[in-house]
């Protein structure tokens, strides 16, 4: 259904265009990234601590979204982030992409746990994580400043041990 491929310089326009949708942007970003910031994010994907992929529909080859893991290799942690164009919501692409990247991360021998930080109002994203086997570990209340407002963050985690029980 999906395939993950490395992000490329030519994806910059695609990644930028996603922010035209306010509903996408509300939970995806604090401020719309500039072209330079997007280019930095793409360039960072060459680092051994970043795994940034474009998610394609495998049957059409069309990009449906992106997914990224930022690795803390000392602690064996991978933090997930993802975003999908609204036209592709509600079809299981995000859940499939999270499962695929989690499998790839645990396929390495240096990752102990995958985790994500979500706005507790972002029900869709929390359902994705639950479906992929993540557990709610707690909430950081009134934690980050977003668009002048204090917002909470729900912490989700999936340990290698629990992932291997499921597979
Ligand atoms: C968060 C986000 C990725 C979730 O997208 P989504 O479309 O809800 O997630 P999925 O692609 O996994 O689709 C799951 C839904 O499709 C349904 N579905 C339909 N066909 C399906 C299939 N073949 N397989 C699996 N699920 C399917 C599921 O039942 C589910 O619906 P539900 O959540 O109402 O139960 C998306 O809303 C988004 O990009 N938001 C903006 C950015 C953002 O919030 N990023 C995350 C920051 S933490």
Image (spheres, helix red, strand yellow):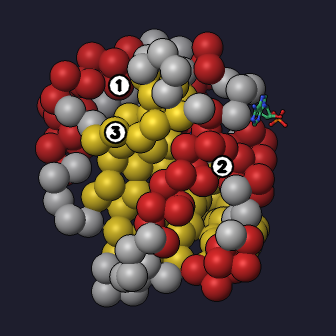
The x and y percentages for residue 62 are: 44, 17
Between circles 1 and 3, the one closer to the viewer is 3
Q: From the Cβ of disc 2, is ligand 1 less than 8 Å away? A: yes
The secondary element bearing badge 3 is classed as: strand
> Which residue is denoted by mark 3 in the rendering?
5
For marks 2 and 3 on the same chain, the one whose residue lies earlier in the sequence: 3
Name the residue nearer the viewer: 13 or 92. 92
Q: Judge whether residue 37 can be spotted in this image.
A: no
Q: Quadrant of ligand 1?
A: top right
The secondary element bearing badge 1 is classed as: helix
The x and y percentages for residue 64 are: 50, 24
> Which residue is denoted by mark 1 in the rendering?
15
Which quadrant of the rendered structure holds the N terminus?
Answer: top right
Name the residue nearer the viewer: 5 or 17. 5
Q: Is residue 130 left or right of residue 16?
A: right
For marks 1 and 2 on the same chain, the one whose residue lies earlier in the sequence: 1
User: Spatial distance from mark 1 to mark 2, Cα to Cα?
Assistant: 21 Å
Between circles 2 and 3, the one closer to the viewer is 3
* Up/down of 12 relative to 75, above or below: above
Q: At x 26% / y 66%, what residue is drawn?
A: 49
Q: At x 53% / y 62%, what residue is drawn?
A: 103
* Up/down of 128 relative to 63, above or below: below
The x and y percentages for residue 93 are: 62, 33
Q: At x 44% / y 70%, what residue is drawn?
A: 107
Between circles 1 and 2, the one closer to the viewer is 1
> Which residue is denoted by mark 2 in the rendering?
119
Q: At x 35% / y 68%, what residue is drawn?
A: 71
Q: From the Cβ of disc 1, is ligand 1 less than 8 Å away? A: no
How many labels were placed on the picture? Answer: 3
User: Circle 3: is it few (<14), some (14-19), or many (20+) Cα within 10 Å?
Assistant: some
Callout 2 touching callout 3 (CB < 8 Å)? no
């Amino acid at each position: 259904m999906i395939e993950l491929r490395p992000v490329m310089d030519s994806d910059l326009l695609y990644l930028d265009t996603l922010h035209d949708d306010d509903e996408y942007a509300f939970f995806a970003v604090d401020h719309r990234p500039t072209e330079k910031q997007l280019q930095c994010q793409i360039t960072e994907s060459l680092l051994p601590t970043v795994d940034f992929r474009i998610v394609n529909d495998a049957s059409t080859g069309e990009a449906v979204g992106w997914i990224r893991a930022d690795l803390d290799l000392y602690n064996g942690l991978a933090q997930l982030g993802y975003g999908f164009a609204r036209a592709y919501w509600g079809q299981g692409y995000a859940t499939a992409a999270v499962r695929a990247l989690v499998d790839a991360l645990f396929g390495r021998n240096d990752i102990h746990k995958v985790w994500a930080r979500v706005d507790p109002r972002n029900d869709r994203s929390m359902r994705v994580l639950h479906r992929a086997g993540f557990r709610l570990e707690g909430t950081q209340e009134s934690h980050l400043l977003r668009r002048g407002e204090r917002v909470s963050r729900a912490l989700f985690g999936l340990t290698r041990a629990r992932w291997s029980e499921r597979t």
